[in-house]
Amino acid sequence: MHAMVLTAPGAPLQFQQRDDPAPGPGAVRIAISACGVCRTDLHVVDGELPGISYPIVPGHEVVGRVDMLGPGVAAVKIGDRVGVPWLGYTCGECAYCRSGRENLCDRPLFTGYTRDGGFATHLVADARYCFPLGEAGDDVAIAPLLCAGLIGWRSLVMAGDGRRLGIYGFGAAGHIIAQVARWQGRSVYAFTREGDIEAQRLAVSIGCDWAGGSDQRPSVPLDAAIIYAPVGALVPTALRAVRKGGCVVCAGIHMSDIPSFPYNILWEERQLLSVANLTRSDGMEFFAIAAQAGIKTHTTVFPLREANEVLSKLRSGQITGAAVLRS
């Protein structure tokens, strides 16, 4: 197999040849077709997340086919097309797991962060944490749904049922969840990097009611806002944009420091929430919704060897929609 391997924080990924992995009990090996590139991959590569053991293979929006079964696997069979998400394992024993909040598990493993991920031709995954994908749809189009879509869905649910929704950071997650929100009948206001005309055009093309820079204020108070950009300064910006009783959801796993802000923009029962990871139930709910809503991902495809270039483009805001690596 081949993989793009991170050997140290901030180092360029190395294209390496490795022995083909063999799945252990309860695991499967997957021949990877496509892997989306997520902003969380940047946080892994840049060493912004704690507890990384090197070397590690990033990537957690994986689509492929099972080509080897480990002992005891019965839920999937060789040839099945599956998706591998960020959440790769939970203990099933801690208080969070027992109460249906496995996204907060005390002893989790995460694909492409604490276990090898999808910037490769093959990976081994826990069969219980692979989503069955069936045969409908294109591998590249599906890949961003495995994190941008799943985390996006969890953040949308946490944002409540408000009709006017602001989305700060209109990349992979933003353009997927805007489509879901529009399908639900909501009005969507898309906030992009200042001057990012391509992202604003994409937002308008998929039905957003308004698109502009994050330095701008909406013409009406928002019921809720979701922040996908890892920019702490957007928190007070979004709080100022939501109505009394509204909420702001921070949807990233990492964010720059939130600056000091006056209490009065949080007062009047505005809420500030964060999203952590996902549950398998989130995945089953979202894939059903995505099919009903007819979600279409806007993707740009790159070969696996170009992972470093793709990460650089993502870091500098040169990716519109989602980037996907083909093995």
Image: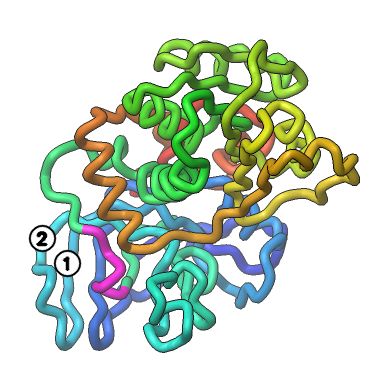
In the picture provided, is 226 more to the left or to the right than 242? left
What colour scheme does the image use?
A: rainbow
Contact flag, marks 2 and 1 (Cβ < 8 Å):
yes
Q: Residue at x 12, y 59 (%)?
A: 80
Q: Secondary structure at mark 1?
A: strand
Residue 25 occupies quadrant:
bottom left
Q: Residue at x 37, y 50 (%)?
A: 146
**Which image quarter holds the N terminus?**
bottom left
Mark 2: which amino acid? Answer: Gly
Q: Disc 1 designates what residue?
A: 67
Q: Is residue 305 visible?
A: no
In the picture provided, is 249 more to the left or to the right than 299? right
Q: Residue furthest front?
A: 268
| Magenta segment boundaries in residue numbering | 126-131
Residue 64, above or below 291: below
Residue 98 image offset from top left, x and y in percent = 39, 81
Q: Secondary structure at mark 2?
A: loop
Which numbered tag is attached to residue 79? 2
Residue 224 image offset from top left, x and y in percent = 58, 34
